[in-house]
Amino acid sequence: MVELLTVIAIIGILAAILGGVVSGVREQQEKVVCAQNMRQLGTAILLHANEHQGRFPLTMHNVSDEEESWVYTLSPYLEDVDAVRVCPADPQAEERLEQGLSSYALNEFVFVPALDQLGRPLGGSYDSVFKLDDPARTQLAYIISDQKPLSAYSDHTHSRGWKNWSRVVADIQPNRFSRGESAANGLGGSANYLFADGHVELVDADDFKSQFSGGRNPADPTQTYR
């Protein structure tokens, strides 16, 4: 009986270790696939800009027809838009695919022109590659927050209003890659970020939050993340 209990205990320990290894491998694979998706989207955004006098595609903030939003207008520049518009770690990935949505949200600073009440351009608009002073440090896209509704209108952030951390996590998921269930406060993990030169960085959620603690909004091209 003692030997049997010992064997059972050893099997339990090995199962726990194996489960942790499998979970870690799966998380790493999801990070890699997500980064590949974002890089392809970044390439498509730059190709679109190249054919439209440097201007970036539009979001549902500026158009009324879903087929005019960036998820659809980038399709001609991608081999298979459905293969890259959803993050494999997104718990609502299947629903987004079915509804033609994306796991990624574009940076309001870049993709939503700042206008006054009469529709006239204001300062602080960066909707063209020619308006970016530091593309390698300018954030283009994020992994969408679990708090955002499944809606075409969730295709962009409201990063001009990121005055505190709660507004950030209402828009994006800074801890998309974390062991177990993601903490509601957006910490305890990491996420991929797409930059305007086309590269993708994996950033720790705590490091991202520290930017706000220092009084900086890393989504703002004039206050770039470093």
Image (cartoon, rainbow, N blue to C red):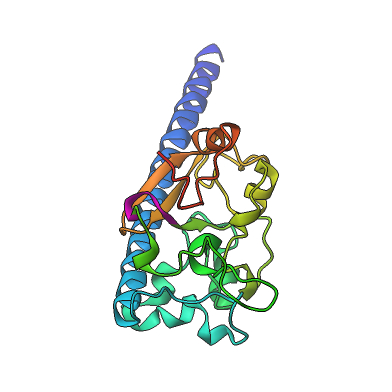
Residue at image location 55% in from the left, 45% down from the top: 217
x then y, percent, for residue 95: 60, 70
| Magenta span: chief secondary structure | helix
Q: Observer-nearest residue: 52 or 169? A: 52
Q: Is residue 145 visible?
A: no
Residue 77 in the image: above or below residue 189: below
Quadrant of the image occupied by residue 100: bottom right
Q: Observer-nearest residue: 107 or 76? A: 107
Quadrant of the image occupied by residue 60: bottom right
Q: Is residue 83 magenta?
A: no
Question: On the rendered image, what quadrant is the N terminus found in?
Answer: top right
Q: Is residue 208 left or right of residue 120?
A: left
Residue at image location 40% in from the left, 49% down from the top: 31
The span picked out in magenta is 135-139
Q: Observer-nearest residue: 149 or 221? A: 221
x then y, percent, for residue 78: 33, 77
Residue at image location 46% in from the left, 49% down from the top: 222
Residue 194 in the image: above or below residue 76: above
Residue at image location 42% in from the left, 73% down from the top: 56
Question: On the rendered image, what quadrant is the C terminus found in?
Answer: top left
x then y, percent, for residue 48: 34, 77
Residue 3 in the image: above or below residue 41: above
x then y, percent, for residue 58: 50, 76
